[in-house]
């Protein structure tokens, strides 16, 4: 998943990330590690954005 800036949708900030079940079921250990790291980064970004509200 490509890291992008938060999107504005109908006046709301939106941060997309992997669904946790995808992270658990990714086809290989490497894919799981990458997806997990990307999901954590997106959640941290969302947390930071929430602090800006």
Image (cartoon, helix red, strand yellow):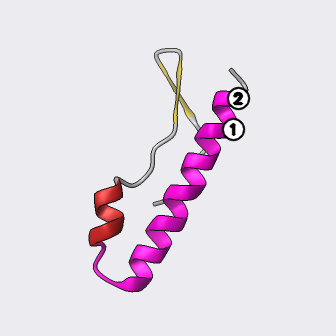
Residue highlighted by disc 2: 51
**Where is the C terminus found, in terms of image quarters?**
top right
Q: Which residues lie in the magenta part?
A: 26-51
Q: What residue is shown with label 1?
A: 48
What secondary structure predominates along the stretch shown in magenta? helix
Q: Looking at the image, can residue 2 be seen?
A: no
Residue 37: x, y in percent? 54, 66
Cβ–Cβ below 8 Å for labels 2 and 1? yes
Instruction: Name, please, the residue furthest toward the bottom.
Output: 29
Q: Is residue 20 left or right of residue 35?
A: left
Q: Is residue 50 toward the left or the right of residue 30 in the image?
A: right
Residue 9 at what x, y percent from top left?
Answer: 47, 23
Which quadrant holds residue 21?
bottom left
Name the residue rendered at 56%, 50% in the picture.
42
In this picture, residue 19 sits left or right of residue 43:
left
Q: Quadrant of the N terminus?
A: bottom left
Residue 31: give its label.
Answer: none
Q: Is 27 drawn above or below residue 41 in the view shown?
A: below
Q: Residues within 10 Å of mark 1 (few under 14, many from 20)?
A: few
> Farthest residue toward the top?
11
Q: Residue at x 64, y 29 (%)?
A: 50
Q: What's the distance in space between the residues labelled 2 and 1, CA to CA? A: 5 Å
* The quadrant where residue 46 appears: top right
As drawn, 52 above or below 5: above
Secondary-structure class at tag 2: helix
Which of the 4 image quarters holds residue 27? Answer: bottom left
In the rendered image, residue 46 lying in the magenta stretch gets the answer yes
Queried whether the magenta region covers residue 48, the answer comes back as: yes
Q: Which element type, helix, strand or loop, lies under badge 1? A: helix
């Amino acid at each position: 998943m490509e890291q992008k800036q938060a999107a504005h949708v109908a006046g709301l900030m939106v941060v997309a990330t992997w669904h946790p079940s995808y992270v658990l079921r990714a086809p290989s250990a490497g894919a799981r590690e990458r997806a997990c790291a990307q999901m954590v980064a997106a959640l941290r970004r969302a947390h930071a954005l929430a602090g800006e509200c």
